Image (cartoon, rainbow, N blue to C red):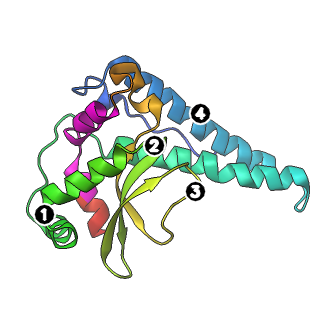
Amino acid sequence: MADIYTAKDFKHLLGLAGFSDTLLTNHFTLYEGYVKNTNALISLLETKEIGTPEYAELQRRFGWEWNGMRLHELCFGNMTKNASPLAEGKLREKIEKVYGSFEDWQKNFVGVGSMRGIGWVILFHDREKDELFSTWINEHDMGHLAGCTPLLVMDVFEHAYMLDYGIKKIDYIEVFLKSIDWVTVEERFSR
């Protein structure tokens, strides 16, 4: 079976202020591994009998690889060299309504991201109740808010910052916030 998924090219992010090209290239390579493993698991699952331990373990692993692929795509997709502040509009209004102010949301997002541990910080939109949540996702395959749309995704696994920032995760978070492509985040909100 041919590969179903192809790694997206994020090389346009090379030269992004605050991120070395080495860190970004390493990160892109890690992401490409998730794409490769997602394809491999799809192929392997077709060869295993449902109900066998092998099938069960491959199914359990699939969420890890799939979400590793998609979360990296969302994260790289909401980064840009041409960042600008979040403009006035529906997303800013929603953030201000839920968090009191944009600055209070940012303080919350940074606070979640600076917690000890590995994972992701995701600004989710619950369309059913029209609520926003800045949430910590510990692992790719655990802790997602079912039915919610990821609007802004920040990788806080060590591979996302250690090469450039060592253990100073907060310095990485501050640089990440300066690279947000708010136009993309707003498009995710309005879909």
Give whichever of discs 1 and 2 has the lower sequence position. 2
Is residue 2 placed above or below 45 in the rendered structure? above
- Give the mark nearer the N terminus: 1 vs 4: 4
Q: Residues within 10 Å of mark 2 (few under 14, many from 20)?
A: many
Badge 1 element: loop
Q: Which mark is residue 72?
A: 2
Give whichever of discs 2 and 4 has the lower sequence position: 4
Q: Is residue 53 above or below residue 82?
A: below
User: Does residue 113 appear to the left or right of 83 in the view shown?
Assistant: right
Tell me the number on the disc at residue 142.
3
For the residue labelled by badge 3, is the local secondary structure a helix, a strand or a loop? loop
Left or right position of 63 against 31: right
Mark 4 surroundings within 10 Å by alpha-carbon count, few (fewer than 14), some (14 through 19), many (20 or more): some
Q: Position of residue 47 (x, y in %)?
A: 86, 50
Of marks 3 and 1, which one's residue comes earlier in the chain? 1
- Who comes first in sequence, dot 4 or dot 3? 4
Q: Which residue is mark 1?
A: 101
In terms of depth relative to the viewer, which is nearer, 167 or 64? Answer: 167
Question: Main structural element of the magenta stretch: helix, strand or loop?
Answer: helix
On the image, numbered disc 4 is attached to which residue? 33
- Please tell me whether mark 2 sits on a helix, a strand or a loop: helix
* Residue 159 visible within the image: yes
Can the viewer see residue 4 in this picture?
Answer: no
> Residue type at mark 1?
Ser
Residue at the far top: name it. Answer: 22
Rendered residue at 40%/65% (across/down): 149
Quarter of the figure that contains the N terminus: top right
